Amino acid sequence: MTIQQVLALARPALLSLKPYSSARDEFDQSTAARDLIFLDANESPYPTTYNRYPDPHQRELKKVIASLKQISERQIFIGNGSDEAIDLLIRAFCQPSVHNVIIPSPTYGMYSVSAAINEVSVKSVSLTSAFDLDPDAVLYEINNNTRIIFLCSPNNPSGNLLSSEAIDKIIESFSGLVIVDEAYIDFSGSVSLLEAIDRKPNLVVLQTLSKAWGLAGLRLGMAFGHPDIIALLDRIKPPYNISSVAQRLAIEALDDRSSKQRRVNEILEQRRLMAKALQPLKSVKHVFPSQANFLLVRIKDAPRAYEFLVNDGIVVRDRSRVALCEGCLRITIGTAEENNKLLKVLAAYE
Ligand SMILES: *Cc1c(COP(=O)(O)O)cnc(C)c1O
């Protein structure tokens, strides 16, 4: 596919949209002398630290992410969580009540919720019982109104990577947008698909600062793709979607790569220990292999196991009513102390 073909799928009304122009957008900073007096945005003049609006284009943060990811700033969209990027991608490419998206099942719930909010219908395609992706089953569901295929790898709630051959086949065969959500990529032994965005204009890769970077409270998600797709998302986003606090703290946090790597390594070690310790428990039927920071565990009477854990103050996610996850709990990897407590409680569950 060419980028022209991809853009031809975007909603025409948005391609021709005249975006909101903020006060600072209409002033060319480069032509000015230093000490500026800003009386253009109806802000308070009193320096409460946060009296000024944030940079709507997140220039400094994008510079940091570009250097970290070795891509161009123009290939980066920053959202108020990946959830904002998911919503904007659906809004940019799907006409309500007309277009549809394809979503493998089971997977992250926000794709279908965002689609429903936008009145975009969802074609659900079951993963295999081992949570593998059957590319032909996905391609079979495509019709003239299919605009987006969502793929989550490593997949939530199963934890496995989708086969890269299957993902490639879908990107190659589908004349629409393929969104690969890599929220958990830093916990996997696999490389990101990021390097492919230069060659594949119909590919958008999502990542987030919410998991491996430990910044879920900041609400920062990223979409990486062709500069023209990124520009479209930037035109339709709320102008000040990322607060000054979030931008500043993210810039600081991204500077400390070694702490992040240390925490990721610790979680990987804990994941290994947990999988090994859970397996022999009497109540545990299966521990699914994981490339993420959680384990999907099939357990005797999952809803009762959930309550049993809650009784001891441990909250996990009951996924037992999700297709293919019958009888399963999803357990996030915590600190060594937290994990040991969980193991101790589960050892008493029968
Ligand atoms: C946790 C998670 C995210 C993160 O969403 P944010 O809005 O960035 O916090 C995205 N995708 C998947 C699959 C997730 O599990």
Image: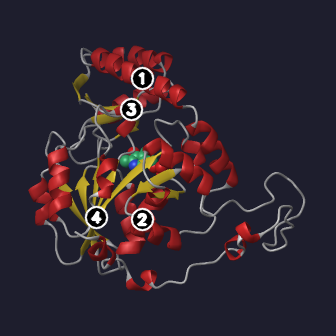
Between discs 2 and 3, the one toward the N terminus? 2
User: Considering only order in the chain, which callout, 2 or 1, is on the residue closer to the N terminus?
Assistant: 2
Q: Where does label 1 land, which residue?
A: 265
Q: Which residue is mark 4?
A: 202
Q: Which mark is residue 293?
A: 3
Quadrant into which the N terminus falls: bottom left
Q: Which mark is residue 227?
A: 2
- Nearest to viewer (mark 4 / mark 2): 2
Q: Is residue 98 left or right of residue 20?
A: left
Given contact means CB atoms under 8 Å apart, are the residues at marks 1 and 4 in contact?
Answer: no
- Tell me which amino acid carries mark 2: Pro
Where residue 127 is drawn, which disc sits there?
none
Q: Marks 4 and 2, how far apart in space?
A: 12 Å
Residue drawn at x 42%, y 33% as measured from the top left: 316
Please name whichever residue, 271 or 75, is drawn nearer the observer in this view of the structure. Answer: 75
Report how far apart the C-alphas of labels 3 and 1 lie in the structure: 11 Å
**Type of amino acid at the residue the image marks with label 4:** Asn
Q: Amino acid at mark 1?
A: Asn
Q: CA distance from mark 3 to mark 4?
A: 29 Å
